[in-house]
Image (cartoon, rainbow, N blue to C red):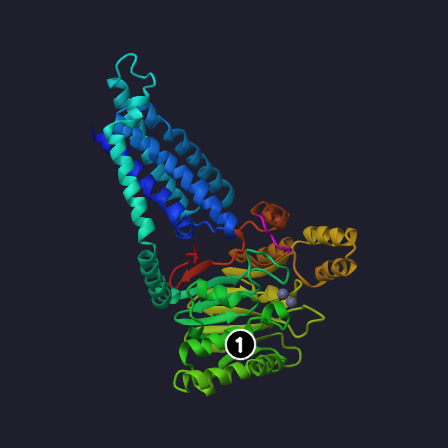
Amino acid sequence: MIFRILAGLIGFLFLNIGLGFVAFPDILATAFFVQPAHAQGLNAIRGDFGGLFLGMSFFCFLGAAAGRARWLAVPVPFLLFIIVGRMVSLGRDGFSAAGAQSIMLEVVFVIVLTAAIAVLVRKDKPGQNDFHPGEMINARVLAVVAAVAVILAGLVFSQKQIGLTLARFIATDFMTSNVIDDLPDGLHVALIGSGAPLTDPRRASPCTAIIAGRNLYIVDAGPSSVRKLEVMRFKPEDITALLLTHFHSDHIGDLGELMLKRWAGGAMRRPLDIYGPPGVETVVDGFSLAYSLDTQYRVAHHGPEVAPPAGAGGAAREFLFASGQTEKVIIDADGLTVTAFVVDHRPVDPAVGYRFDYKGRSVVVSGDTVPVEPLSRQARGAEILVMEALQPSMAGVLAEVARKNGRPNNARIFEDILLYHTSPEDAARIAREADARHLLLTHILPPLPVASLKPVFLGDAGKFFSGPITIGEDGMLFSLPAGSDQIQKKWLF
Ligand SMILES: [Zn+2]
Ligand SMILES: [Zn+2]
C-alpha cells in the first residue's frame, strides 16, 4: 500500500508540473531553465513538456489506483531516457548542479516506481496481467479524473487573480532583489553582453560587470546590454563608474540608456563617471545631447526631486598615457586598483584594456585587440583573463558565403575584421604565457547561434592552454571571494 501511495504522490507531482507547463508555460520553462522562442516555443512547452508530464502522471495514477504493476511500468522508461539525456548533457555541456539534482530526484522516482512494480507483480495472480478495460474506469480512477478537472476549472476561472498575484510577486522580486547584496566580499566578473556587432540571439553586445566589494564597475555598454544588466538583477543606479575600452558602436551603443536608467532609477544628483582614453568626452557629450530633450521631459513630468537635472547624463573622465607609457593606474579606491593599458585595435586608436586588483584577486579585460605586449604584461598571473575572441576559420566561411551570394561589401568586412581581433588560439597562448588561471572568451565572433558550433569556435585553443577555457555567455558570473583562491561560477538568469 505504501508504494502505491508513493507512486500516487509522484503522479500528483507530475500532474502539477504538467498542468503548470500547459497553463503557465513561461513560468515553468524558467523553472526548468528553458527559454521558449515566441509562439512556437510556447507551443512546444505546453505540448511536449506538458504532454510528457501529464502522460507520466496519468500512468502513475492509473497504476496506483488500479494496483496494477504494468501501468506503473510505463513511466519508468521515460524517466530512464530523461536520465540518459541529462548524463549526456553533463558530459557534453559541462557540470550543472541543477542537472545533477534533477538526476538524483529522477533516480529516486525510478526506484520508488520499480519497488512498487515489484510488490504489485508479486501480488498479481496468474491471468491478472491481461488487459481489463474496466480497471481504467474504476471508482478511484474516476475520482482522480474528477480532481484533475476541478484543478483545471479552478485555474481557468481564477486566471485574473492568479495573474495579479503573479504580477505582485514578480514586481516585488524585481524591486527587492539585487545581485550585489548576495555576493561575498571579493572580486566578481559578470558577462552582461558576450557578443559582438553581428547579431547573436543569445548574446548582447560587449558589456562586462566587475564587482569589487560593494562597488559595481561596468566595462563597455554595447547595444542591448542594459536590458540584460537589469534581467541579471543589477541596478543601473548602483554603478560606481563606466569604463570604455574604445568607441566602436558595439561598445557604446547603450550608453544613452545606461546613463538615463541610472539617473531615473536612483534620482541621482551627480552624472555617471565615464572613464576612457581621449575621445571619451566626444562620445559622452554626444549621447548626453541626444538624450537632452528626454531629460527635460522627465524633469517636467516628475519634478526635480524625482529627476534632479544635475544628475542626468555622464561626466567624461579622460585619461592620457604619457609618451612611451602603456599602463596607468586610473582608479585606486576602496581597495580596488584599476589599471588601464594600451592595446592595438588600429585603425581604432586609442584602444585600451583594464586590469582589476582587489584584496589579492585579479581580473583582466582585454578590450578589442590583436595580441600585444602590454596585454600580456597585465595578464600576468590574472585569475580570470577575459579575452575577446574571433575564430578566423568561421569568419572565413562567412566571407566565402557573402561573396558567393553577391555581397562583396559584407565579404570585405569579414576579411578586414581578421586583422584587428584575437583568435581563441592566440588568446590561449596569451593565457599560457601569462600564467593566467582561467581564460574566459567574450566578444564572440562570429555568432554561435547553436551550441554545437562551440568546438569549431575553440579550434585548437585547448592545445595551447591547459587551464579551463570558457566560451562566455550572457548571464555568467565568476566569483573570486577575498581571502581564498576559489573561482566559483554561477548563472544570473
Ligand atoms: Zn572594436
Ligand atoms: Zn568590438
Res. 412 image quadrant:
bottom right
Q: Quadrant of ligand 2?
A: bottom right
| Quadrant showing the N terminus | top left
> Residue 390 versus residue 131: which sits nearer the camera?
131
Q: Residues within 10 Å of mark 1 (few under 14, many from 20)?
A: some
Side (left or right) of 15 relative to 427: left
Element assignment for label 1: strand
Side (left or right) of 136 relative to 381: left
> Residue 149 versus residue 202: which sits nearer the camera?
149
Magenta segment main secondary structure: loop
Res. 483 image quadrant:
bottom left
Res. 326 image quadrant:
bottom right
Residue extending farthest to the left is 1
Query: Residue 453 appears at what percent x and percent y?
Result: 61, 47
| Quadrant showing the C terminus | bottom left
Query: Residue 259 appears at what percent x and percent y?
Result: 50, 77
Residue 313 visible? The answer is no
What range of the chain is rendered magenta?
Answer: 446-450
Q: Is residue 378 magenta?
A: no
Residue appearing at x 70%, y 54% in the figure: 395
